[in-house]
Amino acid sequence: MSEELFFPVIETERLSLRPLVTDDSERLLEIFSDQEVMRYWNTAPWTTIQDSLDFIDESNESMRRQESLVLGVYLKSTGELAGKCMLFSYDKASKRAEIGFGLGRSCWGKGYINEAGEALIQYGFNSLGLRRIEAEIDPDNRASAKALEKLGFTQEGLLRQRWEINGVVSDSALYGRLVSDRVSSAV
């Protein structure tokens, strides 16, 4: 499989999805140090610029190893980094990966997750040859559940007491979408 497949630029009507660069580190820290953005994540909020730099380096290295696809979500109108989207836990043999998103609060409620998500899903199915894409979220995160359902995902299960972050124990809701699923509500 070509390395270029893991360093794409994916264009949508309002967004450009492309690999993160060092210049994105300050905006990434701004987004992922926000307690509200990180409320349902299985990691603590970021605290230093080094967290951003490490994330960018680790993401690009993981893409070079063809283990994941981590892309910044940029607004075409301003060039601003709105957040990130990713296909990770890529299993080439099983034709499966997990999807994840994170957007800055100023970008919430504008349909960016649906737009970027469907573009990333189609890239996974059509370019990476995936058969299945999975998502794992905190079941209390109704906004993510709604976004996944709008993207054609089906809740498939619940893992009780899956995570403990800063002393808080939480469950995980598991979602899946197959390449063969008929999806009428996606972009």
Image (cartoon, rainbow, N blue to C red):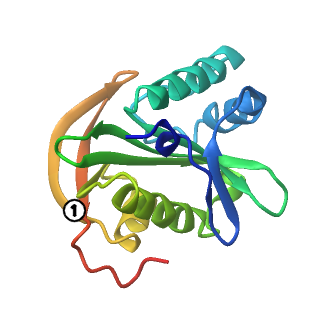
The residue closer to the viewer here, 13 or 55, is: 13
Q: Quadrant of residue 113?
A: bottom right
Image point (38%, 63%), residue name: 148
Give the position of the N terminus as an image quadrant.
top left
- Of 165 and 110, nearer the camera is 110
Relative to 172, residue 123 above or below: below
Judge left or right: residue 24 versus residue 94: right
Residue 61 shown left or right of residue 138 in the figure:
right
Q: Is residue 90 left or right of residue 72?
A: left
Above or below, comparing residue 180 to residue 144 in the picture: below
Amino acid type of the residue that numbered disc 1 sits on in the rendered structure: Gln
Which residue: 73% across, 26% down?
A: 22
Determine the image quadrant of residue 43: top left
Residue at position x 44%, y 40% from top?
A: 2
Residue under pointer 1: 155
Image vertical order of residue 164 relative to residue 126, above or below = above
Q: Work out whether residue 104 can be spotted.
A: no
In percent of width and height, residue 49 lies at: 71, 19
**Residue located farthest toward the bottom when viewing the structure as drawn:** 184
